[in-house]
Amino acid sequence: MASFDQNMRNISEITKSQYLTVFRNALNVEADPLLEKIKKTPLRANEIKFGMRVGIGGGFGMSEEGADTPQARAPIYSSMTAASKDAYVDVTVSEKTVRLGQSDVSAMINAVADNLEASKEAAKWNVGRMLYGDGTGKLAGVTAVSGKVVTVDDVSCLKEGLAVDLWADGAASAADCANQIISIDHANKKVTLRSEMTGDAGALYVQNSKGREITGLRSIFDGTVTELYGKKKAEHPVLVPAQYDASNDIDDILISDAVAWASDYRSANTDMLLCGADAFRAYERYMRESQTTIVEKKMYVGGAVGYKIVCGQREVEVVRSRFVPSDRMWGVDTSMLELAHTDWDFLQYGDGTIFNLLPGKSVYRALLANYMELICRNPGGFFEIINASDPA
């Protein structure tokens, strides 16, 4: 029978050898169709500095024999800055599970595998959500608190099991921390928590994450976000996407015009149209009624299904996302997006194990970490279509 310490080493080795690759694939590819398409680059410093090219080079010109040739005019670059963000996935296994595993190793491994799967699903969902966020970690505004039940303004970024903090507006610290969501009444936008909320109205954030998430797409599209990568949007129009109003009557002409404008005036090659739930439903209806030519159905690694269509003389993938505002569409050039990261890996202790006994608890914990930031090199080449749902 293996010793207790040997069991812990075995668990560590099995987790690293059999599950790390699974975690990486889930969190780097499967979490969202957008994540599947964008490139991943190595993170080399905590502060990321990159240049955003504006327009084209100015060194072209005509001349004649004996006359001066055109003057060199390098492309215009705007210097951008972003700080990497720290992402962690917590994996736990009880001391009891390990001790009982001394006589039944397979049962111990199965218990650990179940914990790993639960942690993977939680991380996968949150990574997908962060791609569409504004970097603040805000999940929903809270309009009322009554014991364990809070009323919110939006439930699209909430999920059972998620641990959340409640922050009052303008507060310097959270009023309630790491309270777990037990159930969600989607129709009435009411959330039941594990314990009573000690605060009042404000907003829910992912636990310990306020102001610490990656620069997601909402940072680009939300007009209330005034700065992007250290630059004020008001002073740099090329940071601001174009916006179109579908007036609850979405069609291919509007989408084609948006794709063509982004190409003609912002040097963007739109290849993905990310749709909120109502907008996607409205466009599916439009495609059926207008017999829109679908190049093919697009299957993504994570299980999502979209459509590949031709718009603005380009092939564009149309896919639904629960994290895009319901009546909106976001057109993006995925070649301009990249995830700079160190990749996911377990923190290791001096003896090579990844599980450590938590002080004062009979629980062993492993921590999966990644340091990352989402970079966009041409945010002004994106576009947003509002009021893209069916008429009320």
Image: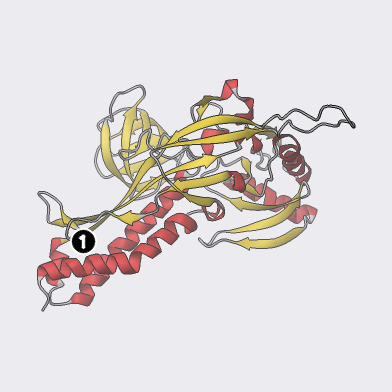
- Relative to 78, say whether 354 is above or below: below
Query: Crowdedness of circle 1 by 10 Å Cα count: few (<14), some, many (20+)?
Result: few
> Residue 233 appears in which quarter of the rendering?
top right
> Residue 54 appears in which quarter of the rendering?
top right
Q: How did the renderer colour the structure?
A: secondary structure
Residue 71 shown left or right of residue 328 in the figure? right
Q: Nearer the viewer, residue 311 or 198?
A: 311
Q: Quadrant of the N terminus?
A: bottom left
> Residue 110 appears in which quarter of the rendering?
bottom left
Residue 319 shown left or right of residue 3 in the figure? right
Q: Nearer the viewer, residue 385 or 50?
A: 50
Q: Quadrant of the C terminus?
A: top right
The residue that appears at 73% across and 34% down in the rendered structure is 265
Q: Is residue 187 visible from the viewing direction of this image?
A: no
Residue 194: x percent and y percent?
Answer: 26, 45
Residue 158: x percent and y percent?
Answer: 41, 44
The residue that appears at 33% across and 56% down in the rendered structure is 345
Residue 325: x percent and y percent?
Answer: 55, 40
Residue 162 shown left or right of residue 60 in the figure? left
Residue 14: x percent and y percent?
Answer: 27, 69
Q: Is residue 304 visible from the viewing direction of this image?
A: yes
- Relative to 43, say whether 172 is above or below: above
- Identified by mark 1, the residue type is Gly
Disc 1 target residue: 352
- Relative to 260, say whether 171 is above or below: above
Q: Outermost residue, bottom direction? A: 1
Report the label total. Answer: 1
Q: Say which element carries label 1.
A: loop
Q: Nearer the viewer, residue 275 or 278?
A: 275
The residue that appears at 66% across and 53% down in the rendered structure is 317
Q: Outermost residue, front direction? A: 66
